[in-house]
Image: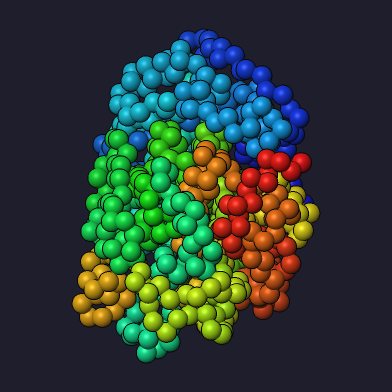
Amino acid sequence: MQTKRAIFIKSAAAIATLAVLILASPRVSITQTSLNERITGAIDERSRSIIQGHLHPLARPQLDQGRLSPVRTLHRITMMFKRTAAQQRNLAALLVEQQNPASPNYHRWLSPEEFADRFGLSSADLDKIARWLQNQGFTIDDTARSRSWITFSGTVQQMQSAFNTEMHEYLVDATRHYAAATEPSVPTAMGDVVLGFGSLNDFRLKPRVKSRKVNFTSNISGNHFLTPDDLATIYNVRPLYSAGLDGTGQKIAVMGQTNIIVSDILAFRTASGLPVTPPTTVLVPGSADPGINPDDLGEADLDLEWAGALAPNAEIIYVNSSNGVFDSFQYSIGQNLASAISISYGDCEGNFSRSDLNLLGALAQQANAQGITISAAAGDSGATDCDGDFTDRQVARLGLTVDAPASFPYVTAVGGTTLYDVGNYWSTANNGNNGSALSYIPEVPWNDTLVFRESGLSAAGGGSSIYFSKPDWQSGPGVLNNGARDIPDISVSASLHDAYLICSMGSCVDGYRASDNTLFAVHGTSAGPPVVSGIVALLNQRMTAPQGNVNPGLYRLAQISPSAFHDISTGGNWMPCQAGTRDCPRGGLIGYGAGQGYDLVTGLGSLDVANLITSWPLLTSTP
């Protein structure tokens, strides 16, 4: 596996440019990049440069249904601009220095405009590209404040004519999708400026949350369900409330791709004893109204309700787009909407086009430079993430794989645990906020497939990236010397055993209960990003400033203040596998076991939040 990984990274030059950050040294100096014009010649249509990496892995030739209708309108296509080699080196150095307490650039975050002046395209070049697009008949939807991208809309015919590509339909799992059938090209004068295109396909990510209505009462069955009050007790958040930390003045942006029913969010906050304040909702300008998608609504409700669970006075901003969560992600970063971003959607690395990974990596780097912390779910199919798309699959067939964007070095990957509540950890009655947890509850890796025999592959995601090499900050006891970015970084309860309560589709009539006395319970690593984003809001409030990419701090703190983490050292994310498939020559199980220190199952472990935030200032005084 190591040899294959090295060959792939070496051959993927575009992705390798994103890995400069990982290899950068804190001692690299930062120099101002001169924004000289890069488009110096005439934009001649006759000379073209192909922009590689846009053929989606799921748009296979055998699934091709022919050309897409030429009159169909494609909305919010993104042209992302490539940084020069000097810009990328300087950005890599800046990102390292922003996390180095000894550097004068420590936590000196950039605005999008400051990012533009150092790492964006020149205004003159941007104007040339905008005029060229308009001359092709496109409508300009947005130009990034960072001058890092431009979004536009037009017909399929205009796309095919301007970029010499073909747009086809594909029938994938009985659903029609569209995607580029050939690589796009641009006039050669723009060839060294364009990194790639976003939204050249409509393979939207699917929600990962696992939901069910619970048809019994917990006080009779003995089952327990998590409320915000429970999580505040289990992960030791309550002392922070006593110290006045509640998220006041902080903003958390939640990524979505469906409209929501605000009354559900308010009902959840009422039942949980939280301030009854609605989220701020933002529809990305130029996006069509996505309406309410029942498949996505439960995910949106979980993310919005639990983002405010541990930071009750933080402002929750719901960013929504019919083009999908990554369009919401792009807009949130471009507008610098919040210092914490929660994204619970993802897919295995192999299901992304190379261009999509390039664009997401460039966006995530900009987010970190602006001081934004991104939290993403590590996946729900154990160490075999690509098999997770097949919900009825009982054994893995596609080998060891991990989830993106969790695998990005610029993102905090949140895995899953199971509360091992054998003993006296719950009260026999709920308190006024519907909580009943009495203390921290020991945890093991979430693995409902092996422990609870749940159908399908259902366990904590974790493993090693095939795209990204090991960041310098990912070190410490237990961290493998494998040269690869490993996930998760930290973990949060995710098991069906103690599922999260939510309100969705009018389910909460009497507290959390519906009119038929049922509860709406969900589980999976989808719960992790909003919960961790709430913790980041408390941390930012305590430090009176955004913290950016918190991963370097987490790994350093695990060594100097281990009481900030609950180390989880038994269990694993093994999945049954089919004999003769990749990584499974003889059948049985594939995956990883938990161990002391870091592991590929629960990362550094779960958090003792009060200890984490109390200890965080040590990072500025410890070499």
Residue 59 x %, y %: 46, 51
Picture layout, residue 43 above or below residue 260: above
In depth, the one of 524 and 245 nearer the eye is 245
Q: Is residue 330 left or right of residue 176?
A: right
Residue located 30% across and 72% down the image = 512
Q: Quadrant of the N terminus?
A: bottom right
Q: Residue furthest top?
A: 41
Residue located 41% across and 46% down the image = 248
Residue 358 x %, y %: 55, 39
Residue located 34% across and 59% down the image = 274
Q: Is residue 463 left or right of residue 284?
A: right
Q: Quadrant of the C terminus?
A: top right
Q: Is residue 209 left or right of residue 213?
A: right
Image quarter for residue 32?
top right
Residue located 23% across and 66% down the image = 506
Residue 39 x %, y %: 52, 14
In depth, the one of 16 and 159 nearer the eye is 16
